Image: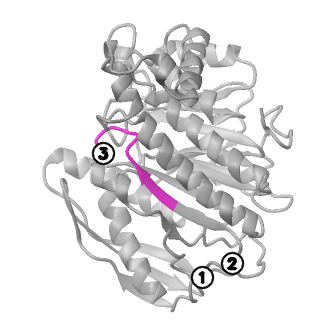
Amino acid sequence: MGTVFSFDIRDPCTPAIEAALAEAVAWLRHVDEVFSTYRPDSTISRLARGELLLAECCEEVREVLALCKSAVRVSGGWFSHLAGGTLDPSGLVKGWSVERASRILYEAGARNTCVNGGGDLQLRGEAAPGVPWRVGIAHPLRAGELCVVVTGRDLAVATSGCAERGAHILNPHQGVPARGHASLTVVGTGLTTTDAYATAAFAMGDMARDWLQSLDGYEGFAVTPDGGSWCTDGFPGVLPGALPGVLPRVLPGTRTGAQDP
Amino acid sequence: MRRAVLATASTSTLVVVLLALKPHHTTALADRAPVPVPAPSGTVPSGPSDPAAGPAAGNGTYTGDPVDTRYGTVQVSVTVGAGHLTGVKVLQAPSGDGHSRRVTAAAVPRLTQEALSAGSAHIDAVSGASYTSQGYIRSLQSALDRAGG
């Protein structure tokens, strides 16, 4: 199995956008070659085995490891790229690579795009003129159903959970699978941190809600194993049945146009 | 990159790429060409046709190849109407041990939802599913290839 990436571009196609789409696909392949921990010849595998020094790695590896360290710091160690004692920045690389792919399209003039990496999304602009993006969150306990719909412009949506692939997020402090939630969704502006924080919050279990509530620019929603749910105060979501009549709340600070760093 | 399989009147583009960033991959996936599929969307205004798109697809139902995976055989068919993907039907899915059944029960509706999500009037994308079914995507692609003629 692999991760499926998809690009949904809502702007009129131009030669520049078409070229950028090819560039974005090539970028993801490059990331896979450098960062896949399942390829023994990847840079990250060789670094983990001690065959390479960090100084010998490409700039991207140093950038990713710096971002990992920042996520570890912000999350109080609940995000970890060293869980189990092995170097594995995968928890951050996917969101980072999707955010960069989104930027490649943006710089070529694609202002309204959705880049999806395995169900984690970086969205720019809007779905159609005057129409915000609507992102369904898959219900972790009821196959094929949505539990909430997130609405907004220029936002990132990441969901951590154990529904399909079994428990796969470890509590980095105890080395056991995290079990406090069936799934946990974080909404922010950039997918790099949004995805890493979703992983961290999932690992946190009961402390996730207070932690997400304390973070500026991020909102959270979670489904508990018994089917209950909670969300942070500013979460920009509505129940699927409420659409399209109800005006959804929009995450403060997400109507900012371009979100280039 | 392979040609777009279906022409679409809208200018949106959906390209699916399979990479090995996540656990349980098979390396063969990383060698696959990107798989463009149409982005059917009732909400996007029609624009000039994408010059890169292939010939207009014929309406009808097309059956994909059965694809063997480590979990069992996967086969889907697609229904195309007005150049858009309007339905995905799972003809075969793994049903072996209890775990496989649970994975299939959770994954297949989500994959179908993903394939069709852009066609929904109210949902543009789905977060939370882990779209990792190689067999589904490959069978879907072969069905789309047939639809694209």
Q: Is residue A222 above or below residue A81?
A: below
How far is the residue under mark 2 from the one under mark 1? 8 Å
Task: Give the secondary structure at mark 3.
Answer: loop
Instruction: State which tag comes first along the sequence, 2 or 3.
Output: 3
- Disc ID at residue B50: 2
Task: Give the secondary structure at mark 1.
Answer: loop
Which quadrant of the figure has residue A81? top left
Task: Give the secondary structure at mark 2.
Answer: loop
Task: Give the number of callouts.
Answer: 3
Q: Which residue is mark 1?
A: B7
* Relative to A201, B90 lies left or right: left
Q: Looking at the image, can residue B11 be seen?
A: yes
How far is the residue under mark 1 from the one under mark 3? 31 Å
Residue B70 picture location, percent across and down: 18, 53
**Quick one: quadrant of the C terminus of chain A?**
top right
Q: What amino acid type is highlighted by mark number 1?
A: Ala
Q: What residue sits 37% from the left and 35% below the top?
A: A42
Does the magenta portion include B24? yes
Considering depth in this image, is A19 or A191 the residue closer to the camera?
A19
Q: What residue sits 43% from the left and 17% below the top?
A: A53
Q: Which residue is mark 3?
A: B25
